[in-house]
Amino acid sequence: MTLRFSTRCPNSDYLGFETSPEAIVAAAKKAEEVGFDAIFVNDHIIVDSSSRAAPWTNVYDPFVAMSFIAAHTTRIGVGVSVLIMPYRNPVATAKSLATIDRMSGGRLIAGVGVGWNEAEFAALGVPFHERGARTTEYLRLWQACWAPGEVSFAGRFFSFSDMHVNPKPVQQPHPPIWIGGASDAALRRAARFAALWQPTPLPLAELVERQTALRRACDQIGRAPIPTRMSFRVEFSTITGNAPSPDGKRPVGHGTPAEVAGDLLSYRDKAGLDAFQINFHGNRNLDQLLQSMECFMQDVAPRVSGEVIAAPCPNLHMLDGPRLP
């Protein structure tokens, strides 16, 4: 079985080091070179000073970052994972995404989430408790904006008649929508709107249970089950030089290429996954991230797909450069 893999771009400091425009381009080019099928940027507009929000204090705008990546690549899918949908104007967002799809030659992937940082919503003047309802309505509005012709829409938050929203996207009927989240509401939303469900990293047993719930949600609306592409954290100890954990236990996705491949095989065999979004963690600089990307595609992906290993990964502990706390 040939599996498909996407990855994240460092348009924020989330991956372990301070990002830059040069890092964004280098990661995108490397992802395309080694064979990832898509690369995704992150999203936050403004965050508080909590420890959970710490990795998101420096995030390059996702729309600008996607356009920048599209201009420096030719084949790889370009997406956002995930766009925090409910605190943005959905018409303006639909137009921006359609424009990126046009300018990239039909490579856009629109990942959608409801958000989790209540302080961020408060700062932007959007009621946190409305985020689910807004996301569902805004997805309907996106579809209306992306359909041919004039746009009319009647909803709780937005209503208008006979308006022009252009350009339309290249991909028809619209760019693929990937929906995150694992709550019952998120699964119902995915069943209704998504081409693919993309949860955050989940323990295997929980993932299987949530997949069962997703199939039920699809059955209830008469839709065939949609596929899953789970986010999967990978840290190569042979590259980063970081210990597995203080207690000596190896977290899933952390270790040698062979150990990481074994973890992915468990999810492939027991949850039926044939695609993953790989998030590389523990990197202290851009060089380590690029090496991790290359190592994964030449030494891990073939093991999981049952193919010939292109080349074993070298042991590289490139510790020059500070690691963010």
Image (tube, rainbow, N blue to C red):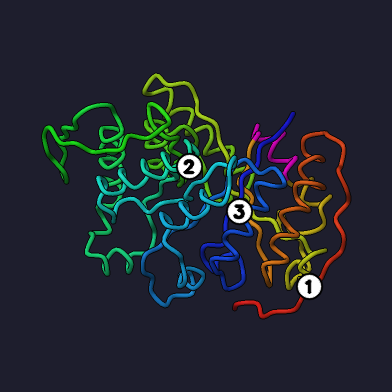
Q: Choose mark 1 or mark 2, whichever is in front.
A: 2
Write down the region rendered in magenta. Answer: 264-274
Marks 1 and 2, the one that precedes in the sequence: 2
Specify whether 129 is left or right of 203. Answer: left
Between 196 and 321, the one nearer to me in the picture: 321
Marks 3 and 2, the one that precedes in the sequence: 3
Specify whether 323 is left or right of 303. Answer: left
Whether the residues at callouts 1 and 2 have beta carbons within 8 Å, the answer is: no
Residue drawn at (84%, 50%) of the image: 258
Q: In this picture, is 183 found above or below 188?
A: below
Instruction: Name the disc covering residue 318, or none.
Output: 1
Q: Quadrant of the C terminus?
A: bottom right
The CA distance from mark 3 to mark 1 is 21 Å
Q: Secondary structure at mark 3?
A: helix
Residue drawn at (51%, 50%) of the image: 71
Residue drawn at (59%, 40%) of the image: 75
Q: Position of residue 296 (x, y in %)?
A: 75, 50
Write down the residue under mark 3: 28
Instruction: Name the disc covering residue 81, or none.
Output: none
Whether the residues at callouts 3 and 1 have beta carbons within 8 Å, the answer is: no
Q: Position of residue 232 (x, y in %)?
A: 63, 50
Write down the residue under mark 2: 104
Q: Secondary structure at mark 2?
A: loop
Q: Principal SS element in the magenta part?
A: helix
Q: Position of residue 153 (x, y in %)?
A: 17, 34
> Which three-letter amino acid code belongs to the residue tagged 2?
Ser
Q: Is residue 94 magenta?
A: no
